[in-house]
Image (tube, helix red, strand yellow):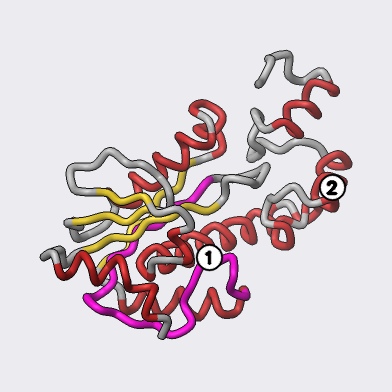
């Protein structure tokens, strides 16, 4: 067990906090689909060997940890903010809204929140931690739940639109994804304010609005 991953939690336990929620979001970079956040309250002094930032784990390990966390956690909340709202309020605010929604969806109210570098206005203390998904076990757990949840949504979208191969690139702007996007066109699920998408729409004459 990487003991350092419980450093923040253990300091808070010593101060009398018991229900510590970690929260993280996934999906800022993709061109399509929602941004997804998770909030997780783990049992006090919980240990899960090998758990870390979801980006550092294989898909197989993420799925294994997902099942374990969903079973063991005191509570798990999910926040899903659609591409349409992302276009309305921008990706940073959509990510913040996703985290707040995930926290609101917890069945147990936390008495302290650890976030992955995001400032949140809550009625309990919040500590934003830069690279928190690799430094706090609670945030690592949230990153896994958010990542698996969003990946599964993109796999489902890939079944609806197989020609876009969403199950492979998960909506991120890979070279292959851009090629498929230009070939097959912009779906409703794309984020219209993201530069590659609004540029394609402008070129096609479908969108006259100027985006920054």
Could you tell me which secondary element the residue under label 1 belongs to? helix
Q: Is residue 132 magenta-colored?
A: no
Residue at the spot 40% in from the left edge and 57% down from the top edge = 38
Image x and y of residue 172, in percent: 70, 50
Q: Nearer the viewer, residue 48 or 65?
A: 48
Of marks 1 and 2, which one's residue comes earlier in the chain? 1
Q: Which of 101 and 155 is in front in this view?
A: 101
Label annotation for residue 69? none
Image x and y of residue 114, in percent: 32, 56
User: Which residue in the protein does label 2 denote?
Assistant: 180
Image x and y of residue 192, in percent: 66, 30
Q: Extreme left residue here?
A: 16
Q: Is residue 54 magenta-colored?
A: yes
| Distance between mark 1 and mark 2 Cα atoms | 24 Å
* 28 is higher (above) or lower (below) than 49: above
Quarter that holds the N terminus: bottom left
Q: Which of 156 and 48 is in front in this view?
A: 48
> Over which residues does the magenta segment extend?
35-58
Q: How busy is the neighbourhood of tag 1: few (under 14 within 10 Å), some, or many (20 plus)?
A: some
Residue at the spot 64% in from the left edge and 28% down from the top edge = 193
Could you tell me which secondary element the residue under label 2 belongs to? helix
Q: Which of 132 and 212 is in front in this view?
A: 132
Residue at the spot 39% in from the left edge and 63% down from the top edge = 139
Q: How busy is the neighbourhood of tag 2: few (under 14 within 10 Å), some, or many (20 plus)?
A: some
* 188 is higher (above) or lower (below) than 171: above
User: Which residue in the protein does label 1 denote?
Assistant: 148
């Amino acid at each position: 067990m990487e003991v350092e991953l419980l450093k923040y939690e253990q300091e808070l336990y010593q101060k009398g906090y018991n229900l510590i929620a970690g929260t993280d979001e996934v999906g800022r970079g993709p061109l399509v689909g929602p941004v997804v956040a998770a909030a997780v309250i783990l049992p006090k002094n919980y240990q899960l060997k090998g758990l870390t930032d979801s980006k550092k784990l294989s898909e197989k390990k993420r799925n294994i940890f997902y099942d374990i966390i969903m079973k063991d956690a005191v509570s798990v909340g999910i926040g899903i903010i659609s591409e349409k709202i992302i276009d309305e309020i921008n990706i940073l605010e959509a990510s913040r809204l996703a985290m707040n929604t995930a926290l609101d969806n917890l069945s147990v109210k936390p008495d302290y929140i650890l976030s992955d570098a995001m400032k949140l206005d809550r009625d309990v203390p919040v500590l934003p931690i830069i690279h928190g998904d690799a430094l706090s076990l609670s945030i690592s757990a949230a990153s896994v739940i958010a990542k698996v949840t969003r990946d599964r949504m993109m796999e489902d979208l890939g079944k609806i639109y197989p020609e876009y191969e969403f199950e492979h690139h998960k909506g991120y702007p890979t070279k292959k994804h851009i090629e498929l996007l230009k070939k097959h066109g912009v779906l409703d699920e794309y984020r219209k304010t993201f530069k590659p998408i609004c540029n394609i729409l402008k070129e096609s004459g479908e969108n006259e609005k100027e985006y920054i």
